[in-house]
């Protein structure tokens, strides 16, 4: 059985859990990281020397890095979530990496400042600057989604998983947001997917 180590409120764990849910894989999730600890224990560090979640165990295979895990699951079990055509695959894959290298770092000061920092310790200038930067970046995604149902076209693909968890975070934060109708419509479509609701949208930001 597939075993996933990580707390359900981690954005990176949510990617993996949503992929598992979409595919319908039997699995076991074990709380680790954050308030649960365990991720610095010697046995955990043997699985992932970085001490971070998620970690995937699939028989004799152990993987870390959330995007790698999602790619593995969809390539091995995903039945179309990772397109076979290299060009189509690359066009969806790029959004996975853009989310983790560009979008997520941009919004992090806003998320950390508003959700995990006591009010009296918040740097509101940094929080607002990060919000503005993220809003500007999301205009790129707005343009991309203006005539698409999902990141890669008419059906859900691997590229939607990181972008979807990010969009949920964007709409869940207590912030002012510019009018991005295509992004909002995309989020509404994702909320029609039971696996997204269970593993991403129903989990509060903490």
Image (tube, grey):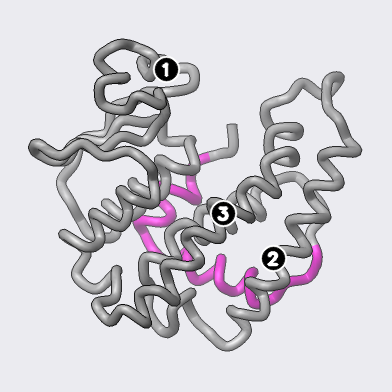
User: Within 10 angstroms of label 1, few (less than 14), some, or many (20 or more) residues?
Assistant: few
Relative to 15, 185 lies left or right: right
Coordinates of residue 7 in the picture (x, y in percent): 41, 30
Gap between marks 3 and 2 measured at Cα: 10 Å
Q: Residue furthest bottom?
A: 147
Tag 2 and tag 1, C-beta contact below 8 Å: no
* Residue that badge 2 annotates: 138
Q: Which residue is mark 3?
A: 166
| Residue at image mark 1 | 36
What residue appears at the point 60 percent right and 79 percent down from the top-left corner? Answer: 144
- Name the image quarter holding the N terminus: top left
Q: Is residue 101 above or below residue 108?
A: below
Q: Which residue does the image show at 35% across and 56% down from the upper left?
A: 195
Above or below, 175 relative to 1: below
Is 193 one of the magenta-colored residues?
yes
Q: What are the residue bounds of the magenta stretch?
A: 178-203
- Which of the 4 quarters of the picture holds residue 93? bottom left
């Amino acid at each position: 059985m597939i075993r996933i180590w990580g707390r359900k409120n981690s954005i990176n764990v949510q990617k993996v859990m949503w992929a598992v849910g979409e595919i319908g894989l039997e699995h076991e999730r074990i709380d680790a990281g954050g308030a649960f600890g365990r991720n610095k224990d010697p046995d955990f560090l043997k699985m992932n020397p970085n001490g971070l979640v998620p970690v995937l165990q699939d028989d004799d295979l152990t993987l870390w890095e959330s995007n790698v895990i999602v790619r593995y699951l969809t390539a091995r079990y995903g039945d179309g979530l990772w397109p076979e055509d290299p060009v189509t695959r690359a066009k969806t894959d790029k959004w996975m990496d853009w989310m983790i290298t560009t979008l997520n770092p941009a919004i992090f000061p806003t998320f950390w400042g508003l959700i995990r920092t006591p009010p009296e310790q918040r740097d509101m200038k940094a929080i607002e600057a990060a919000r503005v930067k993220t809003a500007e970046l999301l205009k790129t995604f707005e343009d991309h989604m203006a005539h698409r149902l999902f990141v890669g076209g008419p059906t859900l693909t691997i590229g939607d998983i990181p972008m979807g968890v990010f969009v949920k975070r964007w709409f869940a934060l207590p912030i002012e947001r510019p009018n991005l109708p295509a992004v909002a419509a995309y989020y509404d479509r994702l909320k029609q997917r039971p696996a997204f609701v269970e593993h991403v949208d129903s989990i509060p930001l903490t």
